[in-house]
Amino acid sequence: MSYKALYRIYRPQDFNEVAGQKHITTTLKNALTNDKVAHAYLFSGPRGTGKTSIAKIFAKAVNCVNAPIDNPCNECENCKGITSGVISDIIEIDAASNNGVDEIREIRDKVKYLPGYVKYKVYIIDEVHMLSTGAFNALLKTLEEPPAHVIFILCTTEPQKIPLTIHSRCQRFDFKSITTKDIIGKLEEIIQIENIVIDIDAIHQIAVFAEGGLRDAISLLDQVRAYSPERITEDDVNQISGAVSISMQIELANALIEGNSTKAIELLNSLITEGKEVRKIAFNLIEFFRDVLMSKNLRELDPNNLLYKNERFIEISKKITNRKTFYVLDILNKVFNEIKWSNNPKIYLELAFIKVTDDEIGGEAKLVSVIDNLEKRIVELENREPEIIRSFIEPKHTDVHKTDKLVSDEIDDSDILEDIEVEDPLFNNEENFEGKTVVEEVDEPVTNEMEEIEKILCDDLNQTYSIEFVETVLNNGNRDDKNTLLNSWERLRRSSNTEEEKHFAQILEAGKIAASSINKIIITFPSASICNKLMAPNNTEIVKKVLKNNYNREIDFIALPENIFEDIAKEFTSLWRQGKRQIKLSKIECEGLKNVSQEVKETEEDTQPKIVKDALDLFGDIVKIKE
């Protein structure tokens, strides 16, 4: 047979050609250079990682004409003879088929004879874990004290099956799975030499399917080349290996995540129709969700895994939670183990898909989704900035026209206005007064006595303007409820029943809801006088009725001037950003506010017209009544 498999053609011939086992090749090269070669070695590791290849390279190196040397020259007669297999002093034994006591006894009897061509006899026993207990016992003494001209190299994929008495007599080297990067590098060398036309995605796919075994990767490349000699694509690799393509894995995973069991089973049927094995489909899905976990939880990902760069895969990774991923993996792992013993594995996988997508109340899948949603909501509530911080870093727009309209609507009786004398020149000027109301603060000299009185009033201010009320609202702010209230804020007057309620509803509409905590709200106004009026005990009861009529629930409130609330908001925001929670605020400052907690409603005997009292409330001492 003239054709020779690629993995045989490209078997490494010296240590420098070995891929991915530098920790072993470096150690052996140093031992060879320093002439410190042991009498027995144990090479253990996954299949196709270079155990037998390194054993043959080592056998050439110790018998090279130029020894001691760190690498065989591959030019001398000894190296060429060992490479071609014509030198009988390098003995390869397959322990899987020669595992009895008689075969080991034959070795024991022959080791005493000197080599015929080279310096050392080298026995390479492959799959040594297959030896029987009697064979291991027959090998013990020879392995412990072999003749000076004999070296044993034991190779195995299952070192745990080898007796400890054998372990203790050997230098053990653990071979590791070859990285995807190293496999790709080796494949590219072969592709270039053999002039193979292949897509880069197909190379990556071969490297991934090899699962750390370079021999498997080269064999798969050889097989795919035979299937598609002109050009090798990713689909060709999937077709030969029986694996599910990345695009189909994404479709199937997306159907499971979205709870679409019908689509998932349809995709499964189409894959089986294409000839894919059920166990391979399950395994590929397990790998896919494993990669999802890696993508979600690792900072550095394998750059050679094309899946991590796929946009649809990234979207799925963001959409699914760790809990849901573990739940899916648990089901798939269980069914993967069960279908090994089943005559109809498709049924098991179909049931697994239905279980993953089960949306019935009380079901495991539903419970996982509910827990994920609850945790997500809790995290959002814990981590988000309170509604007050977001709303008050935005620029504010005061509805001046609305406030002016309120005041002008309130003071619109020309007969009564004639009895009101306003000291401020702005109000004495008919041109200024007509059409709009101008409210300005008037600077007046304040005596020490007045300062003392103001201080006393400020100390009692918390009885009306409770900072604890404000703290409760801000610490438990609910933006959604605030927006709900704002949507119906313009209908306060329409939902009011009495003239008195409509009067206060009109005042409220001039204000703005600054924050809400469902059953408590903060309303801001341009004027402190309006706040004082609304916070009077009897008036607050009317305001609460207005709010209840409009929103069909009990709502408590506090009215604050806009400038004072802005200062409160800044203090709250600053403390929040410092990491503080359940924040305590400074007491509300006095600027124009009064403690009105003891004021009572006007009696029926009070002959002062209502419009006059409203003007006094709005403009304070600048208003005088004509006798």
Image (spheres, rainbow, N blue to C red):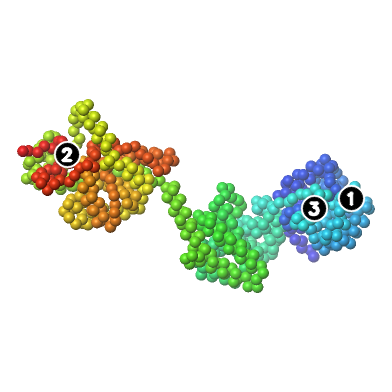
Residue type (three-letter) at the residue carrying disc 2: Phe
What number is the disc on residue 188?
A: none
Q: In the figure, residue 347 lies in which quadrant?
A: bottom right
Query: First in sequence: mark 3 or mark 1?
Result: 1
In depth, the one of 255 and 311 nearer the eye is: 255
Q: Is residue 138 left or right of residue 156?
A: right
Kindly identify the residue that appears in the image at 86 percent across and 56 percent down: 137
Q: Is residue 128 above or below residue 268?
A: above
Real-space CA distance between mark 2 and mark 3, rounded to the nearest whole angstrom: 100 Å
Residue type (three-letter) at the residue carrying disc 3: Leu
The answer to whether residue 186 shows anywhere in this view is no
Q: Is residue 243 left or right of residue 85?
A: left
Q: Residue farthest to the right?
A: 113
The answer to whether residue 362 shows anywhere in this view is yes
Give the labeled residue for mark 1. Answer: 146
Kindly identify the residue that appears in the image at 58 percent across and 48 percent down: 300
Residue type (three-letter) at the residue carrying disc 1: Pro
What number is the disc on residue 619?
A: 2
